[in-house]
Every structure is written in structure tokens, then in C-alpha cells.
């Protein structure tokens, strides 16, 4: 039964994606693109050993030396008359080591045999995963850059669809010049100011593309993370209020990597290569695939690994492939992956039939002339053929699943009724004209009314959209991707959640409001949903933490965010849906204790996952085999702030140990005591259960033992337990989620 409900949800969502491409998360491997030139070549990404460069070389000279090294490698393997420079798409030489090139399969195979070549990858195509939310998170509003001088030093790199710089959200009024550490640039972009301090764009090997945003997505995410407060922001009056980012004083560096066909891995890696060298503090990538990739094949995760080595946390979206178990993508433990929850504003409209019946719709009707009584007309179908040359001026058309917006508009109709949008109501969707989107069942009722033998003409009103208080918030959005992490069951993903439903933020006037080409409205703000919208909330919160603790490692920032998150209680999928809970930026600044980790910890983790020297070298950019010969250790050994406990099956006895260490970042003399919350049948002990610190930055170790038998409870997969370390002032909470592997496999099918 539960599975059936889920399948029909997917169908509904698949339909809605047709209209709302921002919320889509589609994966494809080696797809068509600028490489599909018909000459038998494809774009491959090649990681190489780092070439030692003489210290006295300038960055340009060092770059030129690396380029000639790449050309030398390629020159040996190319067929016929091709020259290496013609085949190279990008050289990665600032922070990463390698290049992207167009190769035939034979050339690729020859290159794979060369010394110095660590690994060769087919392109992965990522997709964008499409204001009040900050008030809802309890982050105080401020817009005075002088009052928050530390924020001015934080630089957020947005890896996205570009930016629309003239939005009021990106005003630099009152901001000082960029911090001295900034080494970035504004390429083919004359709009940089003290807010947008860098902008670059990548496509097909060119680093000179325009960073202007024609999709809206990048403008929206950038303003959510770091937009200035703009009063009176709304979509045609809807959701009117102050739109603002988490850290209005922080700087933005824009890296545009997406085009109409998606966001190609070679462009994303070029962005990471530059962003790390440019000096960003945090990276935000609301991009993903519809399933998780092995860390070594997930090219964005490899980019994020290099960012981590340079002290930069990458915040990523968990994906929009929910509510299915195992749908979470972007699962590398050196990134923070963000699920989407509702905020306390619910957006809806209604369809009022002539007989007085009111039907809820989750469409966004922010149009000036909506709300008029109109005739209902059933044209049989609303596709281009059926509606060609038809005129239905002022009518509301019954379109069912055959809704073609431009064709409906061309008839002069005032609105339409469509089936297919998710009617569970958790996200609202825009259309190019007033629309009621209803469930199949509701649609049948409407048809029954239309066909009823009354003397009166069938009439209906499509109402304008309203916003009301949502008391059930935060609830996890059904589209938000769920755990378990299918690459490593023992690392809990998603990590955390943040508002991602009906988010109002800045928009590009070059972008369609509804995602439909027939939509001609130009708006400065738009309302969209997705884990794409949740991700920059956490990016902003991470920047907020970084502004107080500029030297904290990526793992430290992740730990601070995860251990201070507010529990979300409503979801049946529990931690697989919301991770540790909803981000709480204010508490995350002073977490008390940190679960820290560095490159060596992640390398040990990858070794425990059976990574061989080739795969490890591709990830770390170092040829030396880092792993012992025998696979040793377990995923649960990673000093992660959450604990995932996969067990074989319900009723099967299990026992597992999780070594952990915490660093005191609170007062020097602090005594923390452990409190465990568990469920019947599962025993959790912590040894030692008291940690007495005598100094700041001191690290102490302990072991968490979890054992017993998991019982199926209320039809859920697992059991939610927790460990809280408290000194009376700080409550450092680690979620512990015990789940049945057998049943999660079944649920994933
Ligand atoms: C991509 O670049 C290559 C080499 O410069 C060129 O031959 C090809 O036409 C370009 N493709 C597109 C779609 O721009
Ligand atoms: C800037 O970007 C536009 C759009 O991509 C492109 O047509 C133009 O050639 C670029 N300018 C330079 C100097 O590369
Ligand atoms: C938004 O609210 C402000 C203040 O309440 C008001 O002045 C403004 O007219 C409203 N804007 C719209 C478009 O409704
Ligand atoms: C490492 O594993 C990959 C993928 O399974 C394989 O292609 C490669 O040959 C292996 N390398 C070594 C040195 O075993
Ligand atoms: C603790 O570490 C932080 C930076 O990591 C440093 O600023 C601080 O001075 C250290 N405190 C002590 C007592 O060493
Ligand atoms: C199971 O469901 C019931 C009723 O919904 C609820 O009262 C109870 O707390 C749930 N038990 C657990 C362990 O979640």
C-alpha cells in the first residue's frame, strides 16, 4: 500500500516536471552536448599526477608548464593529424591536477596506459535541483554591513546558472572593498561590485562565457545565501515581505556551469579549480543527479574533496527524487547534503465551481486579472492540434493531462484546469496562465459537475493565490530525496534539512517565471521549490558560522551545523528524510564540541570502503597508495557527527562500535555528560560517559556501542535514537539511526 502511494506520487511528480523544470533532477552519463560532434569523440576527464613546478614560477608560467605536460601526454596517444591543443577542453592546473579532452575510445584506452595518468572518467551531467524562511529559522534580520564586520570577510562561491546582478538583492551599498585574500576575477562581466566580487562562466572549454543568468536558478540561490534585505519583495503581490539571505554582508563569487543541456562535469571541475584558487570560503552547489554515484565516479564530489583539502566546505542539495528510500544523491561525507522541508507559509489557490464547491489547488496564480467568473469549456484535449484555430475567449478550459500552455493561451482562454501536479500539496507551482491543478479524483468531480444536466451553464472561478500560516511546518517535502546512502550505508545522508518549499527569492528577468517558454512575465522575485532552495540556506548558515570561526575546518563547520540542528519530528522516514533535523544557524555558531576530521580521516574512510590505489589517487590527486593492503576499518569509524547503523534484518541480534572524538570549542574548563535516548530492544552505551576538559581546543575520545535487535515500529524502516553531550549550556546532539538493510533494499525496488 505504502509502495503504491509512493509510485503514484512519482507519476504525479513526473508530470509536473514537464511544467517545472527547475525542480527536476535528471541524470545522464556522457549525454549529448558540445562533444557530440559526430567525429566519434567524447569528452573525458583525466586526472593526472601533480607535476612539481619550480617555486620561482609565476602562476601563468606554472600554468603553461602544466599545459605543455598535458599536451605531451595527449600527443602520444592521438590518432592521425589531430593536435593536442585542439582536443583539450580544459586544463585544471590551479587547484586540481588534470584536464578534460575530446577523445575517441581508442585514444582514451591508450591514454589510460600512460604513466602519470591516474584515472579517466566519462562526463557526468548534473542538473539544478529546483522569504520568510529566515525568520522561520530564527536568524535575526540585519542589513547593516558595519555591524557585522566579520561577515564581510566571508566569500561564498555559487556553482550554478549564473547571476542577474542588477537585482536589488545584490546591492553593495555600504560594503567595503573585497577582503585582501580575494584573488578572483570578473570575466566577461562588467557588473562586479562589493557584493558580487567574482564572476566566471564555463562552457565547451571556454572560460569567457557570460555569467549572466537566463535561468533564474542561480540568482535565486545566491540571494537566498547572501542577498541583501529587500522590503516589499513579492511575486505579483504574493508572499509580500522582506526577502533576504542569511549573511547579507558576505560576498558572492559566481561560477556559472550550467547550460540548457545541464551542468557538465568538465565545466563544474573548471569552476572548482578556479574557486579554490580564487579564495572562496564556502561553496554552494544546488546541482545533482537522480541517483548517488560512487565517490570516485562522482566528479563533483572529487572537486569538493579538493575544496575540503583547502579548508572549503561544499554544501550540496540532497536531490529531488523522493520520497523513495535510497534516492539521496551527493553523498560524500566531506560535503553537507541538504534535504528540503516546508516553512511556515503555505501557498495555495482554489477553484470555485458554479455550484459553490471549492477545490484546493497548489498552483501559483500571481496574475493581475485572476478571480473572474468564467464559463467552463471541455475542448476534449488541450494539445496544439486540438486547439488549433479555436477561440474560447474568457473561458476556463478542462485540460486534464493534455495541458499545453501556449496552445491554451492562443485560444484567448482565461484559465485552465489540469491534472497531474502533486496534489499532496507540499509545493506550489507556477503556470504561464491562471490554472487550477487538481488531483485525478477532484478532476472527476469537476467533470461530473460539468456534465450534470442542470439548466445553468457550468461556471468556475480560478482564484488568485493566497499565503497562509502552515502550522505543521517543518515537514519534509515529499520530493526531497531520502536515505539510506546507497554508496555507504554507514554514513547518514542527507545530513540536515532547510526550507525548500515555496521559497521567494531574487529572479532573473531573462528567465521564465513558470519554466514555460510561453510565459512572458518578467519578475524581480519568484517562488520556487526544491532541495536546490534548501542547499543555499545551509550554505548561508555555514558562512554565518565561518564569519565567527574563520579557521574551522569543513568537518568542523559540518559538525557545528549537524549537532545543533532542531529535530523535525513529523516524518515517517525519520533521519532518512531530514538528517539531523532543521538547520539552526544561531545555535551552530557556539556548538560547544566539534567532531572534527581532516583529509587523513577521509582517506582512511575511503580505504575502509575498499578503495584501491588508482581510485584513491584520482580522488586525492596523489599517486602514492594511501591504503594498507588489507581493507581495514569500517565506515562507522569516520569521526562523523551522526551515526548510521545498518543491521541485517528485524529481529537479528547485532552489535556495533563507533569510535568518536570531540574537540572542546567552548569554555576551557567544561565537563560534558552523555545522555542517550533509545527505543525498546536497542541498547546504547557511551564509554567514558563523562568528558572533563581542561583547555580550549582539547580533544577527547569515547566509544559508542549500539547493540540489540531492531523491531519494526509503526511500519517505519528504522529506529531513531540519539546521543547528546551536554555541559548544561551546550547540547551536542548526534542522531543515531538504526535501520534494516533487508527492508531498505525492498523499499528501494
Ligand atoms: C565546442 O568547441 C569545439 C572546439 O573548439 C568546436 O569544434 C565545437 O563546435 C564547439 N561546440 C559547441 C556546441 O559550441
Ligand atoms: C562574453 O559572453 C558572450 C555570451 O556568451 C559571448 O558572446 C562573448 O563573445 C563573450 N565575450 C568575450 C570577450 O569572450
Ligand atoms: C507589500 O507590502 C507593503 C507594506 O505592507 C506595501 O506597501 C506594498 O504595497 C505591498 N506590495 C504589494 C505588491 O502588494
Ligand atoms: C581499481 O579499481 C578500479 C575499479 O574497480 C579498476 O578499474 C582498477 O583497475 C583498479 N586498480 C587497481 C590498481 O587495482
Ligand atoms: C583554539 O583554536 C583556535 C583556532 O583554531 C585559536 O584561535 C584559539 O586561539 C585556540 N585556543 C587556544 C587556547 O589555543
Ligand atoms: C507509533 O505510532 C503511535 C500512533 O501514531 C505513536 O503514538 C507512537 O509514539 C509511535 N511509536 C514510535 C516508536 O514512534
Image (spheres, rainbow, N blue to C red):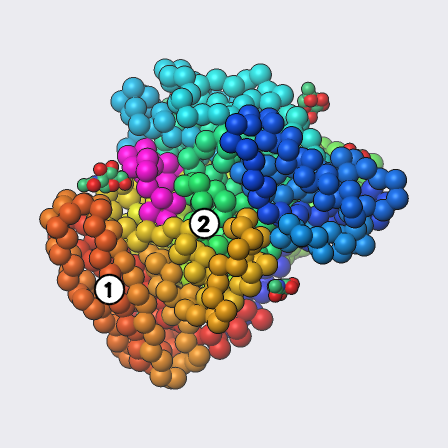
Q: Which mark is residue 335?
A: 2
The mark lying in front, picked from 2 and 1, is: 1
Image quadrant holding the C terminus, namely bottom right
Is the shortest distance between ligand 5 and the CB of mark 2 under 8 Å?
A: no
Of mark 2 and mark 1, the one earlier in the sequence is 2
Find residue 287 and report its image quarter. top right
What residue is drawn where x is 44% and y is 45%? 308
The stretch drawn in magenta includes residue 234: no
Q: Which residues are magenta?
A: 540-556
Q: Secondary structure at mark 2?
A: strand
What residue is drawn where x is 23% and y is 53%? 699
The stretch drawn in magenta includes residue 552: yes
Q: Which mark is residue 222?
A: none
Distance of mark 2 from mark 1, alpha carbons?
A: 24 Å
State the image coordinates of residue 518 (x, y, percent, origin top left).
69, 34
Q: Which mark is residue 702?
A: 1
By secondary structure, the bulk of the magenta-drawn segment is best described as: helix
Query: Quick check: 643 left or right of 112?
Result: left
State the image coordinates of residue 38 (x, y, percent, origin top left).
86, 45
What residue is drawn where x is 33% and y is 56%? 641
Of residues 435 and 287, the one nearer the viewer is: 287
Residue 236 appearing in the image: no
Residue 165 appearing in the image: yes
Of residues 582 and 389, the one nearer the viewer is: 582
Q: Secondary structure at mark 1?
A: strand
What residue is drawn where x is 40% and y is 22%? 180
Of residues 96 and 433, the one nearer the viewer is: 96
Amino acid at each position: 500500500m505504502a509502495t503504491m502511494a509512493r509510485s503514484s506520487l512519482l507519476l504525479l511528480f513526473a508530470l509536473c516536471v514537464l511544467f517545472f523544470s527547475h525542480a527536476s533532477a535528471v541524470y545522464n552519463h556522457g549525454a549529448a552536448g558540445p562533444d557530440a560532434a559526430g567525429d566519434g569523440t567524447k569528452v573525458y576527464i583525466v586526472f593526472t599526477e601533480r607535476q612539481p613546478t619550480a617555486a620561482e614560477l609565476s602562476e601563468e608560467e606554472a600554468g603553461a608548464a602544466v599545459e605543455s605536460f598535458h599536451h605531451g601526454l595527449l600527443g602520444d596517444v592521438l590518432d592521425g593529424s589531430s593536435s593536442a591543443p585542439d582536443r583539450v577542453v580544459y586544463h585544471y592546473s590551479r587547484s586540481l591536477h588534470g584536464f578534460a579532452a575530446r577523445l575517441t575510445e581508442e585514444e582514451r584506452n591508450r591514454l589510460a596506459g600512460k604513466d602519470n595518468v591516474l584515472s579517466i572518467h566519462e562526463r557526468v551531467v548534473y542538473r539544478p535541483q529546483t522569504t520568510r524562511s529566515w525568520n522561520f529559522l530564527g536568524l535575526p534580520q540585519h542589513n547593516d554591513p558595519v555591524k557585522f564586520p566579520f561577515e564581510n570577510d566571508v566569500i561564498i562561491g555559487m556553482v550554478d546558472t549564473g547571476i542577474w546582478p542588477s537585482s536589488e538583492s545584490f546591492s553593495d551599498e555600504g560594503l567595503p572593498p573585497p577582503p585582501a585574500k580575494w584573488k578572483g576575477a570578473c570575466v566577461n562581466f562588467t557588473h562586479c561590485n562589493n557584493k558580487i566580487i567574482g564572476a566566471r562562466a564555463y562552457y565547451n572549454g571556454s572560460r569567457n562565457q557570460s555569467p549572466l543568468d537566463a535561468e533564474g536558478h542561480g540568482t535565486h540561490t545566491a540571494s537566498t545565501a547572501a542577498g541583501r534585505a529587500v522590503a516589499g519583495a513579492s511575486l505579483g503581490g504574493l508572499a509580500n515581505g522582506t526577502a533576504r539571505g542569511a549573511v547579507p554582508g558576505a560576498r558572492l563569487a559566481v561560477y556559472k556551469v550550467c547550460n540548457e543541456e545541464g551542468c557538465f562535469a568538465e565545466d563544474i571541475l573548471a569552476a572548482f579549480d578556479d574557486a579554490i584558487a580564487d579564495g572562496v570560503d564556502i561553496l554552494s552547489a544546488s546541482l545533482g543527479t537522480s541517483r548517488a554515484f560512487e565517490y570516485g565516479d562522482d566528479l563533483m564530489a572529487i572537486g569538493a574533496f579538493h575544496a575540503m583539502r583547502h579548508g572549503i566546505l561544499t554544501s550540496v542539495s540532497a536531490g529531488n527524487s523522493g520520497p523513495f528510500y535510497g534516492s539521496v544523491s551527493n553523498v560524500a561525507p566531506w560535503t553537507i547534503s541538504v534535504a528540503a522541508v516546508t516553512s511556515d507559509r503555505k501557498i495555495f489557490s482554489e477553484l470555485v465551481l458554479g455550484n459553490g464547491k471549492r477545490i484546493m489547488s497548489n498552483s501559483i496564480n500571481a496574475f493581475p486579472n485572476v478571480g473572474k467568473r468564467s464559463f467552463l469549456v471541455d475542448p476534449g484535449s488541450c494539445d496544439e492540434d486540438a486547439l488549433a484555430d479555436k477561440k474560447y475567449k474568457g473561458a476556463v478550459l478542462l485540460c486534464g493531462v493534455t495541458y499545453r500552455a501556449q496552445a491554451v493561451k492562443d485560444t484567448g482562454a482565461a484559465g485552465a484546469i489540469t491534472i497531474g501536479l502533486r496534489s499532496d500539496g507540499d509545493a506550489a507551482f507556477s503556470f504561464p496562465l491562471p490554472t487550477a491543478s487538481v488531483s485525478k479524483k477532484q478532476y472527476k468531480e469537476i467533470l461530473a459537475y460539468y456534465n450534470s444536466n442542470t439548466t445553468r451553464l457550468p461556471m468556475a472561478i480560478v482564484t488568485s493565490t493566497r499565503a497562509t500560516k502552515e502550522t505543521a511546518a517543518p515537514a519534509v517535502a515529499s520530493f526531497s530525496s531520502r536515505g539510506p546512502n546507497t554508496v555507504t550505508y554507514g554514513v547518514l545522508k542527507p545530513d540536515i534539512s532547510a526550507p525548500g518549499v515555496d521559497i521567494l527569492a531574487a529572479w532573473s528577468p531573462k528567465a521564465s517565471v513558470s519554466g514555460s517558454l510561453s510565459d512572458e512575465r518578467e519578475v524581480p522575485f519568484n517562488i520556487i521549490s526544491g532541495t536546490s532552495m534548501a542547499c543555499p540556506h545551509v550554505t548561508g548558515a555555514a558562512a554565518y558560522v565561518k564569519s565567527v570561526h574563520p579557521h574551522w575546518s569543513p568537518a568542523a563547520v559540518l559538525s557545528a551545523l549537524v549537532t545543533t540542528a532542531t529535530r523535525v519530528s513529523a516524518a515517517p522516514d525519520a533521519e532518512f528524510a531530514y538528517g539531523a533535523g532543521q538547520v539552526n544557524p544561531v545555535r551552530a555558531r557556539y556548538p560547544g564540541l566539534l567532531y572534527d576530521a581532516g583529509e587523513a580521516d577521509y582517506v582512511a574512510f575511503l580505504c575502509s570502503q575498499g578503495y584501491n590505489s588508482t581510485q584513491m589517487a584520482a580522488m586525492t590527486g596523489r599517486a602514492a597508495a594511501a591504503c594498507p593492503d588489507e581493507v581495514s576499518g569500517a565506515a562507522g569509524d569516520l569521526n562523523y557527527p551522526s551515526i548510521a547503523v545498518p543491521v541485517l534484518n528485524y529481529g537479528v541480534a547485532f552489535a556495533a562500535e563507533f569510535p568518536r572524538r570531540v574537540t572542546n570549542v567552548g569554555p576551557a574548563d567544561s565537563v560534558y555528560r552523555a545522555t542517550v535516548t533509545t527505543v525498546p530492544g536497542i541498547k546504547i552505551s557511551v564509554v567514558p560517559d563523562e568528558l572533563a576538559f581542561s583547555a580550549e581546543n582539547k580533544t577527547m575520545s569515547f566509544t559508542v556501542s549500539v547493540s540489540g535487535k531492531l523491531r519494526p515500529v509503526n511500519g517505519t524502516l528504522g529506529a531513531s535514537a540519539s546521543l547528546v553531550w551536554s555541559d548544561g549550556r551546550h547540547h551536542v546532539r548526534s542522531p543515531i539511526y538504526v535501520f534494516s538493510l533487508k527492508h531498505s533494499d525492498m523499499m528501494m525496488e
